[in-house]
Image: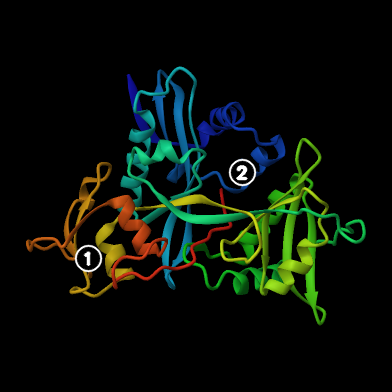
Amino acid sequence: MITIRPLTVADKQQAKEIWELRFHDSLSFIDWFFTERFAPETSFCAEEDGRIISILHGSVMELRVRGVILPAMMISGVATLPGYEGQGLMKRVLFALFSECKKRNIPLAFHKPSHFSIYRAVGEFPCYNALFHMRETEPSAPVVWDALPSVDSLLRVYEQATARYSGIVLRSRADLGKRIHDLTCDGTRFLLHKTAGIIDGYLFATEEDDGSLYCEEALATSFEAYESMLARLPKGSVVKLPPDVPLPGDLLPWGVMIPVDVPRLLRALCGNPSAVRLEVLDGMMPWNNGVFDGAGAKTTLAPTDTLSVGRLMQFLCGYLPFQDSFTQESCYCADEY
């Protein structure tokens, strides 16, 4: 018999073994995750005869969406063991997590899917983009890596550089400290940009198996800082950037947001009863189904539009515009786990 349940501390070893089996992360990263991020009380699994066969991890964070700060659940480590795929287990595990979110008054979840097509089946659509820029020329001099600066100086850049994005994770000093600990475990190198002696840009670079560099996080407070900092990277380096940085590259969908509590999100992100009257369809969370006004109240009036819950989230966060009610925003999230 298969049961769906929250994880416990006693499940940590099984959970680590599944992560090692299903993902290509370094052992140092996995150790970091299960030391710094493992939260059994907000993580769920499917279990058969004492064996975990499907699992996901949840971490409570805060997102700023259209300038509104909301509690959110970051989902990571979504995995099902070989031989158990295609049985609908992950849908059941996700439902358990979303039910826990609703119980905790967390109206929103987000994650970076490995394959968007898998999650489209449960009504999830892209809500973030990222720009992947490859350096086409060698720098004028060999790169000289910078020493790791203080957490406070990086946090200042992060806050300034991400202030204009919808969907960004709010980081505390402790959060950024954990992030740096993760990166330094894997031998990450750092580049900084300074203007008048003040740090106004940074990037984290790791060496791939083929010797090329991948920069998972690069942020700066001006285009000039981005341009100057990236010019120091070797030819062939790939940098993940916010979608509005005016550099050549591939603009790709990079993350999803999932509305767990549609009335609360409409109230927070619209708040105008007369702005919209939407019929929302959600095949995962039945409590999200119904006709709602712009303040999140259910109504018996006929809807002006019918939307899936995934499409609604694209409008709510600003990924796509919707009539005059929801303007388009620049949506970005640097965090992936």
Q: Position of residue 245 (x, y in %)?
A: 62, 66
Q: Which mark is residue 184?
A: none
Residue 107 appears in view: no
Q: Kindly check if marks 1 and 2 are in contact, taking CB atoms under 8 A apart as contact.
A: no
Of callouts 1 and 2, which one flags the residue occurring earlier in the amino acid sequence? 2
Q: Looking at the rendering, which quadrant does residue 171 occupy?
A: bottom right
Taking the image as shown, residue 87 lies to the left or right of residue 73, namely left
* Residue 274 showing in the rendered view: yes
Which image quarter holds the N terminus?
Answer: top left
For residue 267, which quarter of the picture?
Answer: bottom left
- As drawn, the residue found furthest toward the right would be 141
Q: Residues within 10 Å of mark 1 (few under 14, many from 20)?
A: many
CA distance separating discs 1 and 2: 37 Å
Secondary structure under the numbered disc 1 in the rendered image: loop
As drawn, the residue found furthest toward the bottom would be 196
x 82%, y 79%: residue: 197
Q: Which mark is residue 33?
A: 2
Q: Does 212 sit above or below residue 195?
A: above
x 81%, y 40%: residue: 211
Q: Position of residue 7 (x, y in %)?
A: 45, 36
Q: Is residue 113 left or right of residue 240?
A: left
Q: Residue at x 36, y 65 (%)?
A: 321
Give SS at disc 2. helix
Amino acid type, callout 1: Gly
Against 118, is 204 above or below? below
Callout 2: 10 Å neighbours few (<14), some, many (20+)?
some
Q: Quadrant of residue 300?
A: bottom left
| Circle 1 residue | 296
Q: Nearer the viewer, residue 101 or 22?
A: 22
Callout in the foreground (1, 2): 1
